[in-house]
């Protein structure tokens, strides 16, 4: 790389002895449709073969720095990456997360078109038994409203650091996780924030995989999803959206999610993808129709019983 060139975006990957998953994370980075980036892979005092892995890609945009001491968390490696980065924008990528090919292009376009300082994509969290939860504004209801969208979904201007400061490395004193602390300072800074409407990040929460009774290897899962990304990313995105819609309908059926319009809006905004799977669409819309019909019946039934002086719940 020409050292005088300043890339549009600097990608920071904090890692610790995870070359087995980092391999696929880097592949998803190099597979981006937007290619004007540099990547700082910061080891938190790694002792495995991470350096050899990075060298094997033979890509001048990949930079490696290994910290002399292990900090035990992401703030110190992230700060090291911020200091060394030259890009106008900063993106973060977890060493066991994957990006769909349009991730950087989508977020950079969104930031520039909307004149934003900070944005984040929709992230689907994959557990051994399927989708665990979804983070992103359009999926409120399936996700926990108190969860912060993970750093792998973020993109912000580098000069934001001048306003809010670096990541807090004294994370043990924090009342919340380091990423939640960082985002809280972003949100309270008064800058313009708006989420992207695209699902572009796949995350594999380590605790979910470590506690799973069948002990499925997280590396095998990440490799499987990377293979699907490399072969047909559009089809994978469709499958994920279908699975998310199914989760919505399941939770509706259990009475766990109340607003019916959330599912309908999600399908309408992704109609071009959903129409590729017509049978699925028929099933989902049939479910909506039946659910609405039930609510109408229940409402009229309740009104009729009240007129007769009866209680529906008796």
Image: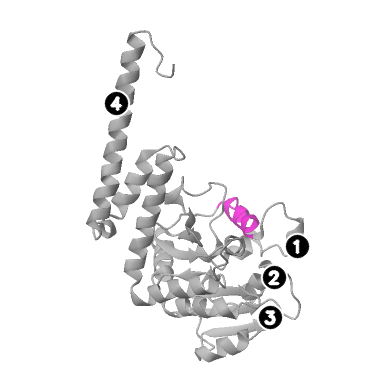
Secondary element at image label 3: loop
Q: What is the number of the mark on residue 46?
A: 3
Res 2 seen here: no
Query: Is residue 181 a member of the stretch shown in magenta?
Result: yes
Q: Label 2 neighbourhood size at 10 Å, few (<14), some (14-19), many (20+)?
A: many
Of labels 1 and 2, earlier in sequence is: 2
The residue sitting at the front extreme is 214
Q: What residue lies at 33% left-to-right and 16% top-to-bottom?
A: 303
The answer to whether the residues at label 4 and label 1 have Cβ atoms under 8 Å apart is no
Of labels 2 and 3, earlier in sequence is: 3
Q: Which residue is mark 2?
A: 76
Q: What is the number of the mark on residue 297?
A: 4
Of labels 4 and 1, earlier in sequence is: 1
Q: Nearer the viewer, mark 1 or mark 3?
A: 3
Query: Is residue 277 a member of the stretch shown in magenta?
Result: no
Tell me the quadrant of the picture where the C terminus can be found: top left
The reply, left or right, for residue 89 in relation to residue 253 is: right
Q: Is residue 1 above or below residue 246?
A: below
Q: Alpha carbon of mark 4 to alpha carbon of mark 3: how far?
A: 62 Å
Q: Which residues are magenta?
A: 179-190
Q: Is residue 66 above or below residue 290?
A: below
């Amino acid at each position: 790389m020409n050292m005088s060139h300043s890339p549009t975006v600097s990608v920071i990957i904090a890692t610790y002895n995870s070359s087995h998953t980092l391999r696929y994370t880097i592949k998803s980075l190099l597979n981006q449709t937007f290619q004007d980036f540099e990547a700082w892979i910061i080891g938190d005092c790694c002792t495995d073969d991470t350096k050899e892995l990075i060298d094997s890609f033979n890509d001048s945009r990949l930079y490696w720095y290994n910290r002399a001491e292990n900090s035990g968390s992401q703030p110190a490696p992230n700060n090291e990456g911020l200091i060394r980065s030259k890009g106008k924008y900063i993106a973060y990528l977890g060493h066991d997360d994957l990006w769909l090919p349009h991730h950087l292009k989508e977020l950079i376009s969104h930031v520039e078109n909307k004149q934003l300082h900070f944005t984040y994509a929709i992230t689907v969290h994959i557990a051994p038994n399927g989708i665990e939860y979804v983070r992103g504004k359009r999926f409120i209801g399936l996700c926990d409203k108190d969860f912060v969208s993970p750093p792998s979904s973020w993109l912000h201007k580098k000069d934001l650091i001048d306003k809010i400061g670096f990541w807090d490395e004294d994370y043990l004193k924090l009342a919340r996780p380091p990423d939640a602390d960082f985002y809280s300072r972003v949100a309270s800074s008064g800058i313009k924030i708006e989420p992207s409407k695209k699902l572009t990040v796949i995350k594999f929460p380590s605790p979910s995989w470590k506690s799973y009774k069948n002990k499925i290897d997280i590396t095998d899962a990440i490799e499987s999803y990377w293979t699907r990304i490399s072969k047909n990313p559009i089809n994978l995105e469709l499958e994920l959206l279908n699975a998310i819609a199914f989760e919505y309908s399941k939770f509706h059926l259990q009475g766990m999610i109340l607003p019916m319009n959330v599912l309908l809006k999600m399908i309408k905004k992704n109609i071009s993808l959903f129409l590729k799977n017509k049978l699925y669409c028929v099933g989902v819309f049939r479910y909506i129709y039946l659910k609405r019909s039930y609510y109408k019946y229940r409402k009229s039934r309740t009104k009729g019983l009240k007129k007769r002086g009866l209680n529906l719940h008796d």
